Image (cartoon, grey):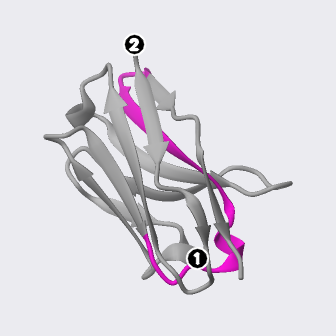
């Protein structure tokens, strides 16, 4: 059974930090690109950061220099370190796994974890 379980969300003041974790199971983790997405109330879900199976990373412009995505293939974990948090970072954050091949692929979503940035 495939599972992606996010932890680490919570309430933090502006300028603070949080580290999200995503524990993966039920699939070959080191063959999947992993990413974090977020969805704020009334807005569409957006891609925040991606790390490929080989460790290359990419970030949405508004989080560059503040967020860092990383992975531990030995532990089947992916992280999102979030620094200098702003109120506009408030959202539900989702972990996502994808492996593409040929004309298709596999993809999985976690259940999400709430991040609230407020004083």
Left/right of residue 5 with respect to residue 13 in the rendered view? left
Looking at the image, which residue is at 29% across and 44% down?
Answer: 77
Looking at the image, which residue is at 42% across and 25% down?
Answer: 3
Q: Earlier in the sequence, mark 1 or mark 2?
A: 2
Dot 2: within a 10 Å radius of its alpha carbon, few (fewer than 14), some, or many (20 or more) residues?
A: few
Residue furthest left in the image: 74
Q: Which residue is mark 1?
A: 62
Q: Which residue is mark 2?
A: 1
- The picture places residue 111, in percent across and down from the top left corner, at 58, 35
Q: Secondary structure at mark 1?
A: helix
Left/right of residue 102 with respect to residue 119 in the rendered view? left
Query: Which quadrant is the N terminus positioned in?
Result: top left
- The picture places residue 33, in percent across and down from the top left corner, at 34, 42
Q: Is residue 51 magenta?
A: no
How many numbered badges does the structure rendering display?
2
Q: Is residue 119 above or below residue 108?
A: below
Circles 1 and 2, Cβ within 8 Å, touching? The answer is no
Q: Secondary structure at mark 2?
A: loop
Query: Which quadrant is the C terminus positioned in?
Result: bottom right
Q: Is residue 52 above or below residue 23?
A: below
Segment colored magenta:
82-105
Looking at the image, which residue is at 33% across and 49% down?
Answer: 78
- The picture places residue 91, in percent across and down from the top left corner, at 68, 59
Could you give the CA–CA distance between mark 1 and mark 2, rounded to whole angstroms?
Answer: 35 Å
Q: Is residue 5 above or below residue 102?
A: below
- The picture places residue 67, in percent across and down from the top left corner, at 44, 72
């Amino acid at each position: 059974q495939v599972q992606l379980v996010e932890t680490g969300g919570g309430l933090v003041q502006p300028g603070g930090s949080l580290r999200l974790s995503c524990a993966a199971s039920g699939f070959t983790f080191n063959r999947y690109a992993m990413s974090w997405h977020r969805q704020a109330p009334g807005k569409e879900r957006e891609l925040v950061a991606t790390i490929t199976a080989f460790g290359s990373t990419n970030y949405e412009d508004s989080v560059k220099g503040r967020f860092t995505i990383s992975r531990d293939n030995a532990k089947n974990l992916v992280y999102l370190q979030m620094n200098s948090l702003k109120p506009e970072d408030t959202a539900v954050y989702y972990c996502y796994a994808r492996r593409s091949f040929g004309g298709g692929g596999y993809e999985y979503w976690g259940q999400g974890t709430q991040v609230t940035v407020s004083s």
